Amino acid sequence: MARASARHILLKTKEEAEKLKGQLSGGADFALLAKKHSLCSSAKRGGDLGEFGPGKMVKAFDNVVFKKSLLKVHGPIKTKFGYHLIETIYRT
């Protein structure tokens, strides 16, 4: 069974997500931005979601974590929770 580790920043609007993605592209620290801006309880861990398998997250989230490139910030990805910036740390 596949496993992955990822971190994310959850935001209310696409505009907020795009603004933070620009900051990340400019070298901003992912964990610091997550702690300051993310609406998810994972914010206190810098957005770290730990390790999980397919089906533990909503489909749009899984599609990024299990199919897109590693160590790259993807998004904004819209889910019922809001807009996510997602970085997959590793996948097995």
Image (cartoon, rainbow, N blue to C red):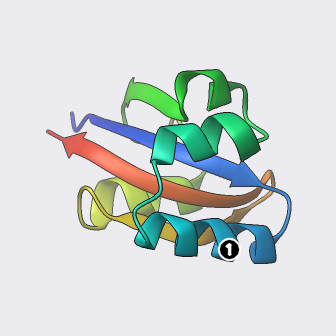
Q: Which residue is mark 1?
A: 19
Where is residue 36? Give x, y as percent.
71, 39
Decide if residue 57 is on the left or right side of residue 40.
Answer: left
The relative height of residue 41 versus residue 58 in the rendered view (above or below) is: above
Decide if residue 63 is on the left or right side of residue 11.
Answer: left
Residue at 30% across / 67% down in the picture? 68
- Residue 28 showing in the rendered view: yes
* Quarter containing the N terminus: top left
* Residue furthest left as drawn: 92
Decide if residue 53 is on the left or right side of residue 18.
Answer: left
| Residue count near mark 1 (Cα–Cα under 10 Å), binned few <14, some 14–19, many ≥20 | few
The relative height of residue 1 versus residue 79 in the rendered view (above or below) is: above
Where is residue 19? Give x, y as percent.
68, 74
Element carrying mark 1: helix
Residue at 48% across / 64% down in the picture? 24
Where is residue 91? Give x, y as percent.
20, 43
Where is residue 8? Give x, y as percent.
54, 46
**Residue type highlighted by circle 1:** Lys
Residue at 43% across / 72% down in the picture? 25
